[in-house]
Amino acid sequence: MNTNLPSTAPAHDAVPAYAARLNAAQRAAVLATEGPVLMLAGAGTGKTAALTARLAHLVATGRAYPSQILCVTFTNKAAKEMRERVAHHLGPQAEAMPWLGTFHAICAKMLRRHAELAGLQHNFTIIDTDDQLRVLKALITEAELDEKRWPARQLAGLIDRWKNRGLNPADLDAVENEAYANGRGAALYARYQERLKALNACDFGDLMLHVLNILRGHPDILADYQRRLRYIMVDEYQDTNAVQYLWLRLLAQGHRNICVVGDDDQSIYSWRGAEVANILRFEKDFPGAQVIRLEQNYRSTPHILGAASGLIRANSQRHDKTLWTEISGGDKVKVIGVWDAPEEARRVGEAIERLEAEGAPLNQIAILVRAQYQTREFEDRFIQIGINYRIIGGFRFYERAEIRDALAYLRLIAQPQDDLAFERIHNVPKRGLGPKALEQMHSHARRTGLPLAAAALQLADSDELPKRTASTIGGLMRQFLHWREQAEVLSPADLLRLVLEESGYNAMLAADRSPESAGRAENLSELARAMEEYPTLGDFLEHVSLVMDNESAEEGETVTIMTIHAAKGLEFDNVFCVGWEEGVFPSQRAIDEGGLASLEEERRLAYVAITRARRHCTIFHAANRRIYGQWVSSIPSRFIDELPAEHIDSQSTLTGGASLWRANWREQQDPFAHVARDYPAKAQTRGPGWQRALSSGYETKPVRVRENTRSAASFSAPARSDIAIGAMVTHDKFGTGCVIDQEGNKLTILFEDVGEKRVLDSFVKVVS
């Protein structure tokens, strides 16, 4: 049976007070108590209210005691909220709900009851990631494998993936076994499980896998749980992985009273094992299931819902649903094309300042990015103009571990007396300079009064250290001497790239097969891109010091910057979706790795982004992004083309629409093909850089001037170069370019092949 609403309800199911405020579809989900039920709950349709009322209804009508209901959520926060809401309806009875919680919390409770069947004692320990890696490293060493080639993190990731799929070591096929150390994956997985049992411990993945094994291997225990748990309710069913699905399906075979709540259009976590197929095949798994669609949205305006619904229809693997709302009015979704990422950050900053002037609270403003590295541009801009912000779901850009590591290298190059920087990177990547060696260096530094790096070098020239340690320190100090020499001739960004390569940091990231390693590499690439804007290493480090000292997370309202993944479940009055270009969003890496399935998940991610907005949603895309110091032309995301025109307000002056932008793709690849426009107006509002360009006749040159964000004081050099702004010049190394800024005899030149560079005027020749 597949229906939107049950035709009739039993007489004793008269609408109770806790369901009186629900709409017809929500009420139907509450009253459909018997048999399997799929509650398809679109974004903002009040699923939590319906789920909570349903749970209260089961108890209030005597269908089940609280201890006979299994109610599963994904987060402790969601479980706490549900318990509080049920307590509002039921009072003290809500306290007696032992099976309301997260998947892992409930399975931990089950496993402690039957620990001996998994080879454990009831007081087993649940180890964290650090302990897991320590055990795996020991096993890798015992197996005489090179941990640098076969990192413990890679094996930990594989084991976690296998457990999420419900696979024991004996279940791995040849392909899975070959995924680690040329066919030794299964053996090491088995040894790892044996080691954990010897420690009376399990990892996070074991909590569900052990319970699944117990239920499969002991029919009497399974039958007991099936008898006890009369009703099963599952929140966010679209996010379940294989082992969670198998566990639920076993438990539901008793009474078959299972109600799952979810939205296949918001399934965005495949990278951590979630399988959208679980919700798509629910009706096949449970024949006769009722399908109840919650489509009335209480969050967003009609244009926002229309844009999101039109976009998601391009996906083929989904349940059809159409969101609607009784909210009237509202602006269309704005789609704005900008020249580059700095302009994107500037335009967003200006929009936020306007909203703030109109009385909009900063707490109701969010910027949603596809990848963490995109936050850096906005952080720098907001600090410049004084907008308080916070990063959700991650560290601020300059606080991330890999960025701090890179900055420590650069600080030590610029200032050899920086002991804190030396402490941070002396053994990163690992060089065999452990705590004992560091303590010896500290002791010598205290005795001699020398900086730590100098004391280390002096100690290495003595007989106080083992030869291998002394040789390692000497080699590291020679590297720093080499890098200081290179700092005199290389740009700060090129210096960073050299350091990351020669220090072995890049190799360390390449060897790390964890899901986070790619993001860390992207962040370092973004750091290098940021450094392209600074003429010297000292200038950049001073900028970073000011950024790090900025306390924009102080008490008071803040703009929220977060990834779209972190935004799921949240809502804001004003949402800015940035970086909607091919390769950025949808992510090229995701498509390369997962094909059509990943593309559809990227589209679901776009749907989630738009539906976070209550009143206003603005989408930005840029014509150019700077990658590894070079300008790379971009085309708008295909998702922009899929937005229904009747719900979109395209305000881009560059494109005339995404389709036209694609038609002009060849022209846009040439940064010198654009004639500068509107310079008189811009010069009045954008400071001395633009004004000087105007006074030099620059508006007649076939090149676009980008806004220079340095202060006016930075342009006041006593001596001026004879080479005018707008002149075409050549450089022996960088090729042909156009002068776009001038500071004394230092020129900022936009080169055709390598982007912006700062050079002395004596190193270039004017093209006649």
Image: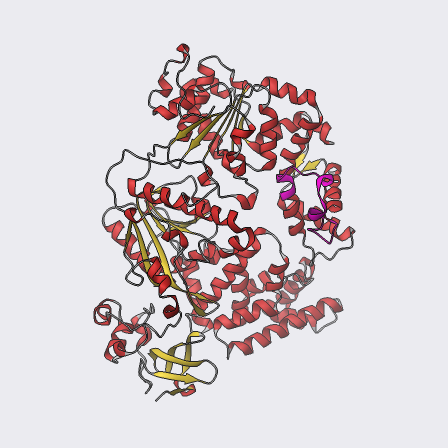
Q: Quadrant of residue 428?
A: bottom right
At x 74%, y 46%, the residue is: 188
Q: Position of residue 711 (x, y in %)?
A: 32, 69
**Residue that protrudes farthest toward the top in the picture:** 11
At x 50%, y 36%, the residue is: 238
Q: Quadrant of residue 329?
A: top left
- Assess whether residue 743 is covered by the magenta stretch: no
Residue 415 relative to residue 14: left or right: right
Q: Position of residue 206 (x, y in %)?
A: 65, 36
Q: Position of residue 708 (x, y in %)?
A: 33, 70
The answer to whether one can see residue 449 in this image is no
| Quadrant assignment for the C terminus | bottom left
The correct choice, above or below, for 438 with respect to 184 in the image is: below
Q: Which of these two is toward me, 178 or 342?
A: 178
Residue 230 relative to residue 131: left or right: left
Q: Which of these two is toward me, 671 or 108?
A: 671
- The count of marks equals 0
